[in-house]
Amino acid sequence: MKSQKKIAQQLVLFVIVLLNFSLAEAKKSKVKIAKNDSAATILKKHGIEQSHLSLQIKNDEDDVVSINAYEKKIPASVSKILTSYAVLKKFPLGFKFHTNVYFDKKNMYLKGGGDPGFVSENMWYLTNELTRSGITEVPGDLVVDDTRFDHIRFDESREDQRVDRAYDSPIGAMSFNWNAVNVFVRPGTAGQAAKVYIDPDNGHFELRNSTKTVAGATKKELVVSISNSEKWISVSGEVQAGAPEKGIFKSINDPELWSGINLKLFLKQRGIEIKGQVRAGKVPAGTDLIVSVESKNLSYILADMNKFSNNFVAEMFTKNLAASENRTNASLKEGVDVIRTELSHIGLTTRDVEVFNPSGFTRHNRVSAQALNKVLLALKNDFTTYPTFLESLPIAGVDGTLKRRMKNTVAQGWVRAKTGYLDGVVSLAGYAGRKDGSVLTFSFLYNGPRDEAIVREAFDQILISSLQ
């Protein structure tokens, strides 16, 4: 059970590292900032050209800082602020998704309700519910019904190149563990292979372990490869004796099959055997509902998306926006249309924002700092949405993607913001609280060649300066 819970924690931590920090840690600048330095001075000291920026800080409707505020830039993951806005407007507070199981005395049916947070804990709960239902054997198949969403797993609005990492997982109405398989590697005895574990170990993938534990420094990089078509996971390279466990997370390619084979395994562990195969299908009309499992509260799922910049959750939310209009076969495009419609209600048009992908994993989205601030202010001025949204954001120096930023400064605990990063794109947008009770909204968007660590440092220094 503990190993199952660890899946969710470590997968989320992986998304933090990959989406919000450089793949190679950049050397920070040694810029000295004076207490009264303006935003323009801070940017100049960091060698950042203002033409590469759209930046705005507001105190309610009053501008505190404005640099190219109406110029649209690629926003990267701060796009999730736009998605959050639509989600909070369309779904009622306390909303929960449902995953249902049906049985017709022959086949068992697992019907996905679009839960973005259906992980091992949920699967165990579902299994325990089925155990108490009195079913001890399923003579037929386990049929997975994924028809709430369409079957486009990787929307064309994402970056073109596919990778086998968890941040590029496929989307399905019935999904499990963010549609990723987890590989944990621990050192063995020096001279022997490392200890490698697939989690969940459901027999779907063959493990090929050609690692070696070494006493000294490693000379061969640890490499984990996956073949979804041939159903194997290969682990090679060297692991240093005494090194801590390392988790690597690989995306699977078929959410329906992945969910079904894991439920079959979980049921077998509790003495319920499915005699047939796992296959895709649809629940026949009139089939008895035997178990319905609720998701976490909407606010917790929103925090999963924003605290850790989870692309998978953003796209699941967006397809659910379309499905909430009483549709089946809901598409991402339909969900993005809902986001655009909600933004239009606060006066934003394509002159201000262009949204194609809800997670920001694209270079086609465009938004200005002014437009982002308008969304942030609209959320702030609506008491029904503001507490939930604010709680979902990373806190400077405390947690999420801001855990290591602005630590031990006046901004620690006083800044809550969404981060964003793509190659050549750095962004940060959210709220900065002052001790006098006022709350600033801010949006910083950078598109240019400057090292992302330097840009992040400049953004942090501007916020620190605004709170002094």
Image (cartoon, helix red, strand yellow):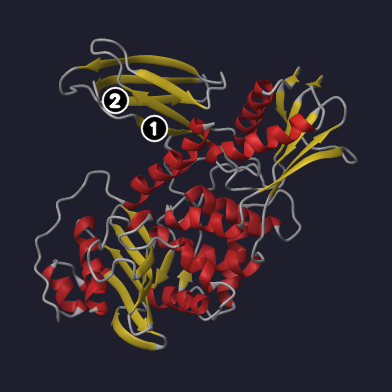
**Mark 2 crowdedness (10 Å alpha carbons): few <14, some 14-19, many ≥20:** some
Q: Taking the image as drawn, is residue 278 in sight? A: yes
Indicate left or right for 252 with 23 as reference.
right
Residues marked 1 and 2 touching at CB (< 8 Å): yes
User: For numbered disc 1, what is the local secondary structure?
Assistant: strand
Q: Amino acid at mark 1?
A: Ile
- Could you say where residue 208 lies in the image, as x and y percent from the top left? 41, 15
Residue at image location 32% in from the left, 80% down from the top: 435
Question: Camera-side residue: 147 or 287?
Answer: 287
Point out the tag, 1 or 2, that comes first from the N-terminus: 2
Question: Camera-side residue: 123 or 161?
Answer: 123
- Could you say where residue 323 lies in the image, as x and y percent from the top left? 70, 55
Q: Is residue 467 above or below residue 305?
A: below
- Could you say where residue 11 lies in the image, as x and y percent from the top left? 44, 40
Task: Look at mark 2 in the image and give the residue it sits on.
Answer: 222
Q: Amino acid at mark 2?
A: Leu
Task: Look at mark 1 in the image and give the residue it sits on.
Answer: 248
